[in-house]
Amino acid sequence: MTPYQLVCTGDSQDLARRAAETIATAIDLALDQRDRAQIALSGGTTPAKAYALLSQQHLPWDRVDVLLGDERWVSAEDPSSNARMLRHTLMEPGSPGAQACFHPVPTVELASPEASSEAFADLIGRLCPGDPPVFDLMLLGLGDDGHTASLFPGTDAPLVTNRWTTIGRGKGLDRITLTAPVLSAARQVVFLVSGEGKRQALSRLLDPMESPERTPAKLVQSQQPITILCDQAAAPDQ
């Protein structure tokens, strides 16, 4: 089993600062070793705060490929679109982060979620070397039901291991998501967990006896220790 490194901060703002620093460090490390860096980011309110801070970092953004770990099958202008959130935070016009090379998940411009999933698989195959493709950083969230990316418990998506992308169905929407093998292949995996509502899910993730069927986030298994950044509200009882 992959070991977890739990890092607890004060409040959600402290967590956002720590997350921004962690992402920036991962980018620097990757660019020290390779010409380009590929990072996959998650949606959500807490990451949005981190991305707004990260956008002000003076990094070689033109050498950074930014992708999403999952995306709802909605228009890029839909309020629930992760791409829209990234454009208004990390890539806010005029910020240093606006120079990043963002590769959104193709969604409703294609005929179906299945077509979008195939197009997204082709995209990451072109950008990221490896089989499965290897990202320099995989930033993941954790749902209160134990899901990560769009691998929801009780659905087919967590079981898919022969493709790089699949369709996740959760909370009434089709979503395009990376599969567990791709999430696990990243050089660095970081979970970002905030709020009291996530405390039980985080305890389950850390429990070596927990079933990945109930908590699909357990399917993410890395060659390196997985970092979990959480605030005090989400921190499990000691």
Image (tube, rainbow, N blue to C red):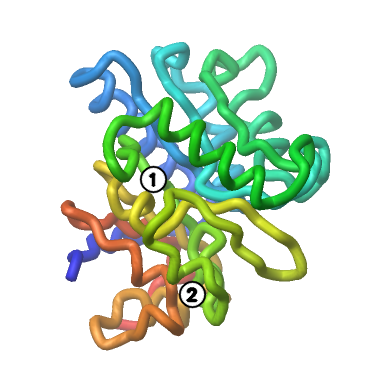
Residue at 59% of width from left, 33% of height from top? 52
Residue 91 against residue 121 in the figure, above or below: above
Q: Quadrant of residue 82?
A: top right
Q: Is residue 222 visible?
A: yes
* Residue type for callout 2: Gly
| Residue 9 in view of the camera | no
Give the distance between the C-alpha atoms of the residues marked 2 and 1, in whole angstroms: 17 Å
Residue 138 is tagged as 1
Q: Which residue is more in the foreground, 94 or 157?
A: 157
**Residue 228: x and y, percent?**
34, 59
Which numbered disc flags the more N-terminal residue, 2 or 1? Answer: 1
**Residue toward you, 43 or 159:** 159
Mark linked to residue 146 = 2
Residues under numbered marks 2 and 1 in contact, where contact means CB atoms less than 8 Å apart: no
Characterize the local packing of mark 2: few (<14), some (14-19) or many (20 or more) Cα atoms within 10 angstroms: many
Left or right, residue 182 beside residue 165:
left
